[in-house]
Image: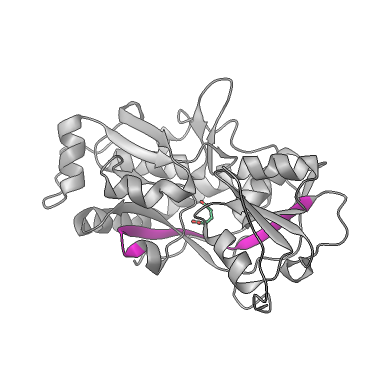
Amino acid sequence: MRKTRFLAGASIIAAGLLALTACNSGTPGAAPGAEGDSADTTQLWEVASDVSLDGSPTFERMVAADKVVVGVKEDQPGLGFKDPISDERGGFDVEIAQWIAASLGFDADKIEYKTIPSANREQELVNGNIDYYVGTYSITDKRKAQIDFAGPYLITGQGLLVAADNEDITGPNDLAGKIVCSVTGSTPLQRIRDEYNPGDTVEYDTYTQCLEQLRAGSVDAVTTDQAILAGYVAQEPETFKIAGDTFSEERYGVGLPKGDTVLKDHINTLFNDGGDVWTALFDKNLAPAGIKGEQPTADE
Ligand code: GLU
C-alpha cells in the first residue's frame, strides 16, 4: 500500500521542546534483536501459579483458551524482532510480553504471537483477536478512546533516519523539498505532517518498507521513534544514520481491551515492582544500540 500526500503550510514547531530519554549516543554494539531468544531471560522471572484476576474478562479468556495471544512487531531489531532464519522472536517488547504472560501463569510456550502493523492495533484489540499488544505503541488520548494502556514502560521520542552520507538533513526543520517515509497509523507520520513542512510524505505498513525506499534513494528520510531507528543503525551503521535529536515524547504502553482495569492494574504493579527485570531487559536488548533510558513509573 502506498499513498502520497503533499503538505502545504504546515506549521513548524521548534524542535527540542520536550525532554527525551532515548538517544543514539554511544557506539552501537552488536546488532540487537537477532539473539533475543526467550531461553536466557526466562530465569529473570518465575511463571506464577494459582493466579486469580477476579473481574478481568481478558484473563478469563486466556485461561479458557489455555494460551495468551499477544500482538507484536517483527521487524524492529532490539524491540520486536523475528529472526528470518530461526523464526525466533526477541527484543525488549517481546520479552516484556513474555514477562507479563509469566506473571499471569503462562509459560513462554503458551504464547501465540501475532504480528500486527501499527495501523491495525486498536481494531485487533477491539475485535478481541489479541489479549494484549506490546510493540512500540505510544499512549495517546485518541487511542485511549478505543482501548486502554498499561504503562508507560519506556519513553523515547521521534527522530529521523537518513543515508549515512547525507549531509543536508540534520533535523526536522531541514525537510523542505525532501521526501519523508513513515508508517500508516503511526504518531510520527501524523506529527511530521501536522507540525513540520516536508516536501512530501509517503507511507507504508512497516518501517522496513521505508528502509528499502531509503536504501534505494527514493525517499530522503524515514521518521519514527529513535529507539526503533537506533536498532536499524546498529544493524547497518555503514548505510544509515540518525539525523539530529528527538522532537517528541513517545510513551510506550501495553495495549489492552478497553475497560479491563484489573489487568491494567496487574501489569502496572508488575512494572513498578519489577525494576530489576526491567533493567536486565533494557541492558540486554536496547543498550547495545546506544539507547539510553530509565524506567518510567507506570501510572496510566
Ligand atoms: N510509537 C509510535 C506509534 O505508536 C511509532 C511506532 C509505531 O508505529 O509502532 O505510532
Front position in the image: 35 or 188 = 188
Numbered circles on residues, count: 0
Residue drawn where x is 25% and y is 59% of the image: 265
Q: Main secondary structure of the magenta part?
A: strand
Q: Position of residue 65 (x, y in %)?
A: 19, 31
Segment colored magenta: 144-162
Picture quadrant of residue 207: top right
Q: Is residue 48 left or right of residue 240?
A: left
Residue 251 x/y as whole percent = 48, 63
Residue 213, image x, y percentages: 72, 43
Q: Is residue 91 above or below residue 35?
A: below
Is residue 136 located in the magenta-colored stretch of the structure? no
Q: Residue at x 83, y 48 (%)?
A: 164
Is residue 158 one of those drawn in magenta?
yes
Q: Quadrant of the C terminus?
A: bottom left
Q: Is residue 272 visible?
A: no
- The answer to whether residue 166 of the structure is visible from this angle is yes
| Quarter of the image where the N terminus is located | top right
- Give 214 or 80, whichever is nearer the viewer: 214
Q: Is residue 14 above or below residue 95?
A: below
Task: Name the residue nearer the viewer: 44 or 163.
Answer: 163
Between 125 and 139, the residue placed more toward the observer is: 125
| Vertical position of residue 193 compared to residue 282: above or below | below
Structure colour scheme: one colour
Q: Is residue 166 left or right of residue 60?
A: right
**Relative to 218, is 20 above or below?**
below
Residue 197 placement (x, y as % from top left): 70, 70
